[in-house]
Image (cartoon, rainbow, N blue to C red):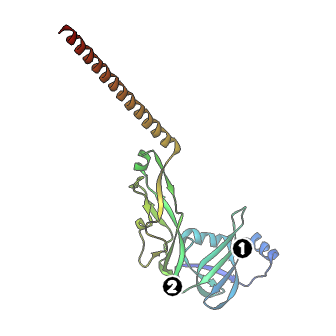
Amino acid sequence: MSSDLKLEAEIGRNHGSSASRRLRRNDKIPAVVYGQGSEPMPVTLDRPKFRAALNAAGPNAVITLDVNGSDYLTIVKNMQRDPIANRVTHVDFMLIDIDQRLVVDVPITLVGDAVLVRQEGAVVQQQMMTVTVEAPAGNIPQIFEVDVSEMSIDNPVRVSDLEIGSGVVPQVEDDSLIAIGQRSRASIAAEDAVDEEADELAEGEEAAEGEEAADSAGESAEGAGEDSQAD
């Protein structure tokens, strides 16, 4: 069985760093196909076509590699990148069966406006950028979109809030945090200042009430003394 996404690759290539550099200068990417007990097969990809395929289908897409006329059902297992240019320098494709269960990392993106969090003087902080799941090769989520519109400081977003597809099993605890409302230091300091001012005001009122009570008691005692002398 093949996937809807098909990518051509040329079999065979020269090994070594100089040969790989020549390929990259010609906008090609060295790659290898392996798995299911077969010998690793070196291939060459067209960079623009590979980039277009990933942009269209996502990093966990099932790809049918057309290698010199033979189809191989694969998934991208690893990509090496140049640390400076961030260009893909090598790709590992793993051979799979469409019904095979795979463990993959799925990206998480936050959508919506966290109004309640903002009203609480906080900002949304994403705690989990990807979530590891086990899923059938033919039903791997490419991305999880998380709506933060209803979240608040006391109501963070957890893995249990994800809309998980059929047969997809997260490999982390359901209560693992994806996004939280985090108050800034300035907001906390401002609230502490208000609380301190309120405490000082309350203490001042209590002291004033105590002085009034003491004055009243003194006046009462003085009045009682005068009455006693009159008698």
The circle on residue 28 is 1
Secondary structure, mark 1, is: strand
Q: Amino acid at mark 1?
A: Lys
* Badge 1 vs badge 2, beta-carbon distance below 8 Å: no
Which residue does the numbered mark 2 point to in the structure image?
A: 98
Kindly indicate the quadrant of the structure image that contains residue 86.
bottom right
Of callouts 1 and 2, the N-terminal one: 1
- Above or below, 101 relative to 130: below
Q: Residues within 10 Å of mark 2 (few under 14, many from 20)?
A: some
Task: Kindly give the residue lying farthest to the bottom in the view shown.
Answer: 37
Query: Which of 136/11 is in front?
Result: 136
> Who is closer to the viewer here, 204 or 1?
204
Q: CA distance from mark 1 to mark 2?
A: 28 Å
Q: Quadrant of residue 53?
A: bottom right
Residue 189, x across and y down, in percent: 50, 40
How far across and down, in percent of the image, does residue 134 sit? 49, 78
Which part of the image, by quadrant, shows the C terminus? top left
Residue 121 tag number: none
Q: Residue at x 42, y 74 (%)?
A: 165
Label 1 environment density (alpha carbons within 10 Å; few <14, some 14–19, many ≥20): many
Circle 2: residue type: Ile
Residue 222 position (above or below residue 20): above
Q: List x then y, in percent, for residue 182.
A: 48, 51
Position of 217 relative to 123 (above/below):
above
Between marks 1 and 2 in the image, the one whose residue lies nearer the viewer: 2
Q: Residue furthest top?
A: 230
Which quarter of the picture shows residue 159? bottom left
